[in-house]
Each structure stands twice: as structure tokens, then as C-alpha cells.
Amino acid sequence: MKKTPDADFLIFDLGNVIIDIDYQHSLNLIRQQLPSSLHSKLDDFYRTEFHYNYEKGKIDSATFRQEVNSYFGQDWEDAHVDYLWNSLLGKIPAERLALVKKVREHYQVGVLSNTNLIHIHAVNDILQRDHGIKNFDPIFDWVFLSHEMGYAKPQPEIYEKMLTDLGTSPERVVFFDDLAANVEAANEIGIQAIQVTGPDVIFDYLQNVQ
């Protein structure tokens, strides 16, 4: 792993690659809002059809909030749904952004993330609060977001669309993602995909980029 990647593009997932996320924290917070008779519904919350549809941009934020309330049998205000939904988002460590800035001197860099409009607004707020920038545009050459693309990882279509937009072949791309299924799907079409199993992986992989 300790080599300079033979590639033209370095593409990063967001969750647990650029920004820390904690699904269990979010589920615990929602659990506190629910009667015990509904706790079992948390098990499949992130696998619901409306969640997948939202991250593919097939439903809007208002519909998503309605679906969350319907799923849990609640009548939460929009702001409260957003608070619970965004509670999985953690910090964006400055050293990760510094790494991206460093490798950008030698590669085109981008983001490919399964996400949604509520989360992206919250991520932009974190960027503004902690780093003084409005969004990822000043940091990355390319920003690919599932809800804007109409597909989500590990669908092969999302990787193919990314490659078309990049105007490159899969072997010229290194892609970092924390989920094995997304890495395997990218590898299957020829992308050099690396699973990020901890915070040091991207630093170790890219340490010799000068």
C-alpha cells in the first residue's frame, strides 16, 4: 500500500472517509424518542425503501420527513426530524482536508457519496463552522452525490456515470470507501478500490505522494 498510486483520479467517499459518522449514535437518539414497543423498527430504518429512494433523489425532503414520521408513528416537526437524521454526522478532521489538498497537486480529486439533501446541508454547515468554507467545491475537483445522480452505491450505474463524467477509464481511478460492498462493486468494473477500515488507511496509502 505504501506507493504512489498509478492513477489520474483519487475519489473519496464521505462517510467515515472524509467525515466521521456514527449510525449507532443516531439510532440511540431516536430510540430515546420512541416507546419501547417501537424500538424494533430501528433495526431496519436505514434499509427502508424510502431511505433508498431519498438518497437516489426519487423523493424530496418533505416526503422523506413524512415517511419517517409514518414509519415510526410519530408527528415530529420538520426541524426535529432533521435533527435526528443529522445526528449521525460527526466532525470533518482538518488533517483529512489537508491530505486532499496535498494530493490534489498531483491528481484530480473527487467525492462519490451516497447522501441526501438534508445531510448535505448539514455537512455544509459543518464545513462553514469548522473550516470557513461553504461546501466541498473549493476542495475537490469533482463532487458526485447520489441524490443528484439518481443512483446509489453499490449500483454499477453510479460508477459508470462517474467514469463518463470524468472522461476516463476505470483503471485510472483510485476510490476509497468504508463499505466492502461498495469497494467490491467498484473493483468489479475495474476501478482501483480501497476499503477504508480505519482513520489511518488513506494516510498510509497516500503517504508517498509528494
Image: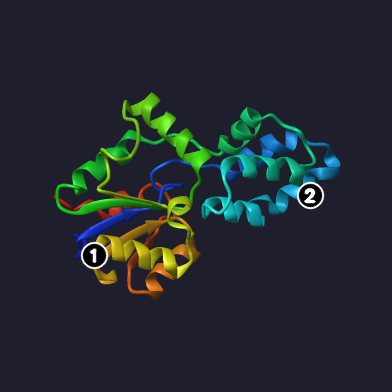
Looking at the image, residue 164 lies above or below residue 90: below
Question: Residue 97: x and y, percent?
Answer: 30, 39
Q: Is residue 196 left or right of residue 116?
A: left
Q: Name the residue at 50% across, 46% down.
A: 116
Q: Position of residue 144 (x, y in %)?
A: 37, 52
Q: CA distance from mark 2 to mark 1?
A: 45 Å
Indicate the amino acid at tag 2: Ser
User: In the drawing, what numbered circle is on residue 129?
Assistant: none
Q: Residue at x 15, y 52 (%)?
A: 106
| Percent x, y of residue 1 | 28, 62
Nearer the observer, 175 or 68: 68
For the point 31% across and 55% down, the residue is 11
113 or 23, which is in the foreground?
113
The residue to which callout 1 is attached is 167
Q: In the current view of this chain or complex, which residue is farthest to the right?
A: 37
Mark 2, residue position: 40
Q: Are marks 2 and 1 in contact (CB under 8 Å)?
A: no
Instruction: Residue 123: give x, y in percent of width and height.
Output: 44, 36
Secondary structure of residue under mark 1: loop
Label 2 CA crowd tier, 10 Å (few <14, some 14–19, many 20+): few
Give above or below for 18 relative to 160: above
User: Which quadrant of the figure has residue 36?
Assistant: top right
Q: Earlier in the sequence, mark 2 or mark 1?
A: 2
Q: Which element type, helix, strand or loop, lies under badge 2? A: helix
Eye-nearest disc, 2 or 1: 1
- Kind of residue at badge 1: Gly
When the figure is inspected, residue 112 is found, relative to residue 184, above or below; the finding is above
